[in-house]
Image (tube, helix red, strand yellow):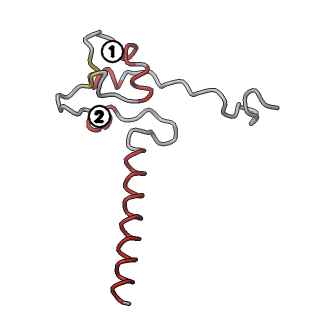
Amino acid sequence: MDLLKTTVIAIGLTIYTSCGSSKTTDNTTRSKNGEKPDAATLIQQMDTNKDGKLSIEEVQGPLKNDFDKIDTDDDGFLSIEELKNAPVPERRSGGPNPEGRTRGGR
């Protein structure tokens, strides 16, 4: 009976910790309070070949969509300076407007 309890607890802890770690990974590139993520953090998280800059293949999400706008020197890479000067992505429509109503709703 003790072996069964130990096994169940071990499986439960494994599931719990794996769920927590994947949630953290999913949010690493997201900013808090809608602010632009830190440029150095973006490079640290996305620079898979560790060359200190980001190629189109390395970036994800809104950064990938706006790559050409952010790459101001047109060299095919995003430097830390280009990321620092990047415009904040526009918010998607469908959220609440200033009066608190959803767009397209009543």
**Which numbered disc covers residue 46?**
2
Which label lies toward us, 2 or 1? 2
Residue that sits furthest to the bottom in the current view = 1
Q: Which residue of the protein is positioned furthest toward the right in this rendering?
A: 106
Please state which amino acid type lies under the numbered disc 2: Met
* Residue at screen point 33% across, 12% down: 72
Image quadrant where residue 81 sits: top left
Q: Secondary structure at mark 2?
A: helix
**90 or 6: nearer the viewer:** 6
Q: CA distance from mark 2 to mark 1?
A: 16 Å
How many residues crowd around disc 2 within 10 Å: few (fewer than 14), some, or many (20 or more)? Answer: some
Q: Residue 22 at x, y = what percent?
A: 39, 51
Task: Tell me if label 2 and label 1 are in contact, CB under 8 Å.
Answer: no
Residue 32 as seen in the image, left or right of residue 17: right
- Image quadrant where residue 64 sits: top left
Residue 11, x across and y down, in percent: 37, 71
Q: Residue at x 40, y 21 (%)?
A: 86
- Return the residue nearer the eye: 82 or 7: 7
Which element type, helix, strand or loop, lies under badge 1?
loop
Q: Earlier in the sequence, mark 2 or mark 1?
A: 2
Relative vertical location of residue 35 with respect to residue 15 in this rendering, above or below: above
Position of residue 67 relative to residue 95, above or below, is above
Residue on which disc 1 sits = 71
